[in-house]
Image: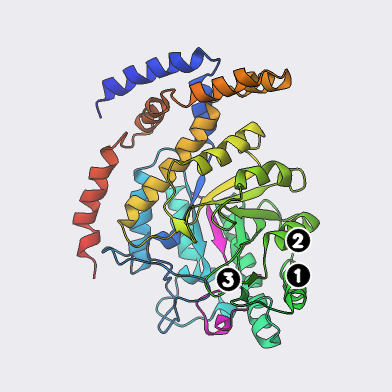
Amino acid sequence: MNKKKIFQLYNCAKEEYARVGVDTETALKKLDKIQISLHCWQTDDVGGFEMPDAVLGGGGIQTTGNYPGKACSIDHLRSDIEKVMSLLPGKQRLSLHAIYGDFNGKKVDRDQIEVKHFQSWIDWAKKLGIALDFNPTCFSHPLANDGYTLSSKNEKVRRFWIEHNRRCRTIAAEMGKQLGTPCINNIWIPDGSKDVPVDRYTHRKLLMESLDEIFRDEYPLKYLKDSVECKLFGIGSEAMVVGSAEFYFGYGIKNRKLITLDNGHFHPTEQVADKISSLLLYVDELMLHLTRGVRWDSDHVVIFNDEIQSIAHEIVRCNALERVNVGLDYFDASLNRIGAYVVGTRAAQLAFLNALLEPVDELRNHEEYGRFFERLALMEVMKTKPLGAVYDYYCLVNNVPAGEDYIDEIRRYEKDVLLKRK
C-alpha cells in the first residue's frame, strides 16, 4: 500500500474518531502494550519433537488437513515464528507445549523433562527480545490412552502426570526468571468420558488433589503465573470432562490461580465475554485462548467476528487490559500455517483496537441516565468508523506490511521455504 495514502487516510480517521471524543494516538499506545502469545503448535499440527518413537494424536487432539510446509524441526519452527513476527505490528510472546523440547533426538519421557531441554528456547527468546509461556502436554501419550491423566484412578498413571506437571512449573519459572518477565504455565487435561459416567465425583476429587500437590512448590509471581483451563467436551470425552468450567472456576477462585477462558471450550450459545467481568471480581488475572468455533470444532483460525469483538470490548470496558493475558489456540492444517498465524493475530489486534477506539465514557453516561436510544445509536455509528485506516497506520509505523500486502510476503515464504521442506 502507498505510504502517503496510508498517512492521508489515517489523518482523516483521526478526525473522525476525534468527533466522538476518541484519541487514536492514545488507543494505539494502549494497543502496543498488548502482547499476544502465539501458540507454537500451529506450525506443525501439534506434533512436537519427542523422539524417536513418540505417540502422537489422541487424547482430545485432532488436526485436519495436509497443506504442505509443516515444520519438521525446531529450526523450522523458529524460522516460521520469526517470519510470522516480522509480519505483525507490536510485540508478541511464544507459548510452548512441553513436547517441543530440544531433546537432541533422544527419548525423554515427560516425567523426566528438565530446564536443559528448553534452554535453547530461552536463549532464542532472549535473542528476539520476547517472552515465553508454557504448557504441560497431558495428551498423545500411552499413559493418556484410557482418557484420564491427573484424575485417573490408577495411581501409577496419576503419579506420572503429577510429576510431569511439577517439572513443567519448574521449567516455566526458570523461563520467567531468565527472561525477566512472568511465564504463564497453563494446565489443560483431556480427562473425561465418552459415554455417561456414574462416578464423576471421584475423578474430580482426584483432580483437585493432584492439582494441590502440583502447586505445592512455590515460585515467585515475578517468574511464574499458574493458570487452569476448562473445557465443555473433547474428542472421546463428549459426555463428561473432568475439568469443567464449574470445577476450574471454583478451583481458580479458591486457590488464586489464573483461569483460562478458551472461547472454543464452551457451548456455542455461551458468551465468553459475559464471563470476564464476573471472574475479574474474584481472581487477579485471566488468560484468554482465542480461537473460532465452527459447529463442534473449536480450533479454526481467529477472524474479526462478533465473538472476538465482544471479548475485546468487555475487557476494555472493564478497564482490565493489565489483568487479562491474551493468547491464541487453534491448529488448522488445511491452509498455509504462517498465514493462519498472521490472519488470527491481526484479527485479535483489530478487535482490541476497535474496542480501544470506542467512546466508552460517553456510552456509559448514556446508559447511566437511561438514554438507551442514544447508546444504541452511537454503538451502531461506531461500526462504520474507519478502523482499518488506523490499523494500517499502526502497521506502517511498526515497519510491517499494511493492508493486504502481507499476503504476497507469505506467498514468497511459502515458495522459498515451505515448499522445499520434506
Q: Which mark is residue 290?
A: none
Mark 3 — residue? 238
Q: Can residue 223 be seen?
A: no
Q: Position of residue 381 (x, y in %)?
A: 49, 21
Q: Is residue 2 above or below residue 110?
A: above
Report the Cα–Cα distance between label 2 and label 3. Answer: 22 Å
For the point 45% across and 81% down, the residue is 55
Left or right of 400, for residue 268:
right
Mark 1 — residue? 208
Q: Can residue 191 be seen?
A: yes
Q: Which mark is residue 251?
A: 2
Q: Indicate the secondary structure of the residue bearing disc 1.
A: helix
Q: Residues within 10 Å of mark 2 (few under 14, many from 20)?
A: some
Kind of residue at disc 2:
Tyr
Report the Cα–Cα distance between label 1 and label 2. Answer: 8 Å
- Residue 251, by quadrant, is bottom right
